[in-house]
C-alpha cells in the first residue's frame, strides 16, 4: 500500500518530502491528528516547505486548533520574510 511505502521511505530516508507524503495519506485516511504530526515534522525538517505549512494549517483548522494555527501563521511569515 502507499501507506506502507511511505513508512518504509521514512525509515530509509526521513526527509521533509517523505513526511509530507505520509501526512497527505493520513489526511486521506481521515487520520488528521497523525497527519498533523507528519506535517509538523515535515516543516521542522524543511522550514521553507510552504505546501506542508499550508496542509498543516488545513488539518489544524479541521481539528479546531485555532491557537496552533496562529502560531503556524507566525512561523510561516518569518520563513517567507527571511528571504
Image (tube, helix red, strand yellow):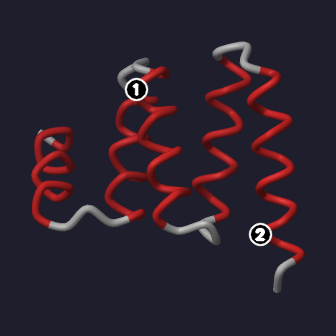
> In what quadrant of the picture does the C terminus appear?
bottom right
Kindly indicate the quadrant of the structure image that contains residue 11: bottom left
| Drawn side of residue 70 relative to residue 25, left or right | right
Image: 8 above or below 59: below
Kindly indicate the quadrant of the structure image that contains residue 68: top right
Comparing 82 with 60, the one in front is 82
Q: State the residue lying farthest toward the bottom.
A: 83
**Residue at figure coordinates x 58%, y 54% from the top left:** 52
Which secondary structure, mark 2? Answer: helix
Distance (Cα) linking label 2 and label 1 = 24 Å
The image shows residue 46 at horizontal and vertical percentages of 52, 68
Image: 15 above or below 29: below
The image shows residue 50 at horizontal and vertical percentages of 67, 63
The earlier-in-sequence mark between 2 and 1 is 1
**Residue at figure coordinates x 62%, y 59% from the top left:** 51
| Drawn side of residue 64 relative to residue 10, left or right | right
The image shows residue 7 at horizontal and vertical percentages of 17, 45
- The crowd level at tag 2 (other Cα within 10 Å; few <14, some 14-19, many 20+) is some
Comparing 51 with 67, the one in front is 67
**Label placed on residue 34:** 1
**Residue at figure coordinates x 37%, y 31% from the top left:** 26
**Label placed on residue 79:** 2
The image shows residue 59 at horizontal and vertical percentages of 62, 29
Amino acid at each position: 500500500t502507499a501507506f506502507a511505502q511511505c513508512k518504509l521511505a521514512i525509515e530509509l530516508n526521513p526527509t521533509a518530502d517523505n513526511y509530507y507524503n505520509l501526512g497527505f495519506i493520513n489526511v486521506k485516511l481521515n487520520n488528521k491528528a497523525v497527519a498533523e504530526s507528519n506535517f509538523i515534522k515535515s516543516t521542522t525538517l524543511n522550514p521553507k516547505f510552504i505546501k506542508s505549512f499550508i496542509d498543516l494549517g488545513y488539518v489544524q483548522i479541521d481539528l479546531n486548533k485555532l491557537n496552533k494555527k496562529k502560531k503556524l501563521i507566525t512561523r510561516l511569515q518569518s520563513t517567507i520574510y527571511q528571504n
